[in-house]
Image: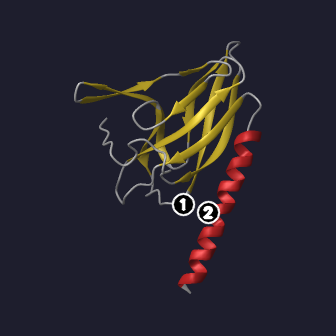
């Protein structure tokens, strides 16, 4: 039975990754999302971080993030001031046309606060990204992000964030 479950889990995980790869390219002509992931949590943990790479095809800004798994999803920046980690909520994140904006541990990221359940490894977390262009037009795209820590995540398991 254990062998059946691990094959089923592996196939489900592979299918999610394949779907996400196609979705990121086809999500919306104005915003490409790639390498998206949410860090899994432990039981009782009230916050989680979401990370991804964004590329807009025209100047715009990320102004809001929504998700059903948390009370709030906020855009944050993180910087070090000596040995002190400084975190700041941003009202918007500028996206310049053609410029890659990396949301990663230790930098810009999306903070999910007031989680309504533990986010487990392999879980699919829906996120809706709201952008606004230079003319004030808002666009919302919804992506499905897998909870996992990629091997390339810088300091993913070593940063402890306080708000």
Mark 1 closeness class: few <14, some 14–19, many ≥20 residues within 10 Å: many
Q: Which element type, helix, strand or loop, lies under badge 1? A: loop
Residue at image position (59%, 70%) is 9
Residue 102 badge = none
Give the residue number, with chain letter if any, for mark 2.
13
The picture places residue 32, in percent across and down from the top left corner, at 69, 34
Q: Is residue 58 above or below residue 4?
A: above
The image quarter containing residue 128 is top right
Q: Tell me, what colour scheme is on the image? A: secondary structure
Quadrant of the rendering where the N terminus is positioned = bottom right
Mark 2 closeness class: few <14, some 14–19, many ≥20 residues within 10 Å: some
Q: Is residue 63 above or below residue 122?
A: above
Residue at image position (53%, 31%) is 102
Residue at image position (42%, 38%) is 105
Along the viewing direction, whichever of 56 and 72 lies nearer the viewer: 56
The picture places residue 114, in percent across and down from the top left corner, at 41, 45
CA separation, marks 2 and 1? 6 Å
- The residue lying furthest to the left in this view is 83
The picture places residue 43, in percent across and down from the top left corner, at 36, 60
The picture places residue 139, in percent across and down from the top left corner, at 70, 28
- The residue lying furthest to the bottom in this view is 1
Q: Which element type, helix, strand or loop, lies under badge 2? A: helix
The image quarter containing residue 62 is top right
Q: How many marks?
A: 2
**Tags 2 and 1 in contact by the CB under 8 Å rule?**
yes
Specify whether 127 is left or right of 137. left
Quadrant of the rendering where the C terminus is positioned = top left
Along the viewing direction, whichever of 18 and 145 lies nearer the viewer: 18
- The residue lying furthest to the front in this view is 152
Give the residue number, with chain letter if any, for mark 1.
122
């Amino acid at each position: 039975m254990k062998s059946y479950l691990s094959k089923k889990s592996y196939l489900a995980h592979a299918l999610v990754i394949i779907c996400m790869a196609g979705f990121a390219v086809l999500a919306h002509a104005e915003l490409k999302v790639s390498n998206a992931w949410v860090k899994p949590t432990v039981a009782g943990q009230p916050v989680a971080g979401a990370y991804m790479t964004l590329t807009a095809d025209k100047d715009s800004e990320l102004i809001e993030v929504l998700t059903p798994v948390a009370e709030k999803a906020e855009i944050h920046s993180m910087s070090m001031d000596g040995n002190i980690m400084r975190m700041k909520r941003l009202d918007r994140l500028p996206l310049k046309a053609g410029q890659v904006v990396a949301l990663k541990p230790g930098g810009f990221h999306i903070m999910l606060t007031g989680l309504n359940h533990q986010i487990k490894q392999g879980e699919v977390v829906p996120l809706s990204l709201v952008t606004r262009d230079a003319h004030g037009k808002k666009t919302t795209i919804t992506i499905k992000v897998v909870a996992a820590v990629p091997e390339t995540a810088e300091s993913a398991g070593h940063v402890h964030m306080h708000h």
